[in-house]
Amino acid sequence: MAKIELTRNRFIKNLLMNRYPQLAVFFVMLVGYIFAIHAGLIGTPVGSHNFSIVFVWIAWWAILILIAVPFFGRGWCAVCPIPLPAEWLQRGAVLAPPEKKPRWLNLRWPKALRNIWLQNISFLLLALFSSVLLTTPNITGIALAVMLFGAIGLSTIFERRAFCRYLCPVGGFIGIYAQTAPIELRIKDKQVCASCVGKPCYNGSAAGYGCPWDVFPGGLTKNTYCGLCMECIRTCPHDNIAVNLRPFSADLAKPSTRMDEAFKAFIMFGSAMIYAGVLLGPWGALKDAAYNVGTGAWFVYAAVFLAIIFGILPGAFSLGLLKGNNNIPFRQRFASLSTALIPLGLMFWVAFSLSFVMTNASYIMAALSDPLGLGWNLFGTANMAWQPMLTTLLAPAQTLALVGGLIWSARTAQKAANEVRVSSIPLIGYCFAATAFMLWLLL
Amino acid sequence: MRFSFSLLLFVMAGLVVAFAPLPVQSIAPRERIFRIDARQYAYSPSEIHVNAGDTVTFELVSTDVVHGLYIDGYDVSVEADPGQTATLTFTTNKPGSFRFRCNVTCGAMHPFMIGKLTVGTNLWLYRAFGLAGLAVIGVLMWPGPKA
């Protein structure tokens, strides 16, 4: 399938060029976000009746993992409210052209930290406390507030969206999985960018801001670090930026060689399996250990969690690489082949989320009418009884997701193995074993 | 042409693995009674195996707060007050694996208070393993990328 340039369509182009539609969505998201913080902090402590838990961890999560990431990549980042107040403060304006002189420190992000290791750590921190985070409104409220104020604080010290690019626990995995999405933002002609004076897409101009994600669009080869904010479309004086529809997982044809990205793949892949076992499994002792933060059992849980992510999964994965061609360094082979885990990891999350979301979606209507759990009934749905949805379709849907993910990963493994000149069979076997384990956990 | 034919063959094989009727061992139905203790946020026992056609009675005993037990797929439920025994009787007329879960908000981890009921053999799991195996064979037979 060839690429289709969506921005050739006049309606789509105008929609992306115009700041107001995006700004309108931003405002709705920001109001919802601030309300979620508010609900978490002052609403009912019963998670299944609190807006912050129901709308963040059920509604938003369902949209993110089942629709936004698989089909739009970093589409969520394009409307995420977290960096907004920070960005407005940094620019000293909501929509006005940027000032020539920076208002704040405007430092470059430290070179040693220009990777996603901090995002890996921030995700793992949330993951280790996830049983409490997902179920306790005030903890969710605090976490949301920390992200909002963290972004604001960083924006006064560092240039552009340092929080989104280097710290956001969600942005890290969205970036990795965005490589599989059938949407991309790319330049049309390299020569135009090479000869462009001033590079307004990166440095900003009277037409708009320089790339908030610190990316020069002329060098974009994959979706991982492009936040789809569309600023470069507005600033490019040569109309050289396009949004394209493309085949799924086009970016994975050229595997990454970065260890931070490789471990992000393992973190997400492993976390999906652990969550499926702990949260959706029938083992009460595991739930107790995950929930009772600070107890001995929780420390054991955290140690096992980290051992699986950083030891067992990459260790077993590496066994298949030992016989590889020695001309290619082990690290490069490891990082390149870990690309194969990206589609499978995404589909593991889809399968896990299907179960969680279909079972708990009925809380959404009740929370909509009584978002703080104060006895309101705004839309007459506050007393809607809990009822799992479409449970008979769950097992087939999960099987389809997992087996589809296995096929997708196995094909990716063949391409990645070809790049680093090793056999793909051990890697495909690894993906098969992980899929079988996930099927056993979920079905 | 050859590739399309192979793909069609694999899709058909997948459909056979997913939906072909399999011989099921016939075991005379009987009455089964299980006492299930419910506490925040677990059932004990949390995994229950019965045969298809059995008449099953769950005696749900809550040891702390009010808990419920709802069985996915069967759409039946029961609620038990602390220290009280509540009874749920149903016939296992659908084979497979089903989650049972608390349907009375009982605390923070309530949405994850889950048990597992297996009726007969969990054939769907074996079919899924078969589909995964078939998928791997299909990919290995698929022409790989050129070096």
Image (cartoon, rainbow, N blue to C red):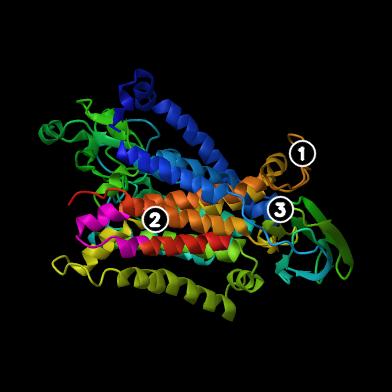
Return the chain for callout 2.
B
**How far across and down, in percent of the image, does residue A417 sit?**
25, 58
Q: Regarding mark 1 in the picture, which secondary structure is present there?
A: loop
The stretch of residues the image draws in magenta is A413-428
Q: Earlier in the sequence, mark 3 or mark 2?
A: 3
The residue nearer to you, when weighing A299 against A177, is A177
Report which residue position mark 2 lands on.
B136
Question: Is A247 above or below relative to B144?
Answer: above
Report which residue position mark 3 lands on.
B72
Report which residue position mark 1 lands on.
A377
Q: Regarding mark 2 in the picture, which secondary structure is present there?
A: helix
Query: How far is mark 3 from mark 2, CA to CA?
Result: 31 Å
Query: How far is mark 1 from mark 3, CA to CA?
Result: 28 Å
Return the chain for callout 3.
B
The residue drawn where x is 55% and y is 63% is A440
Please say whether residue B56 is visible from this viewpoint.
yes
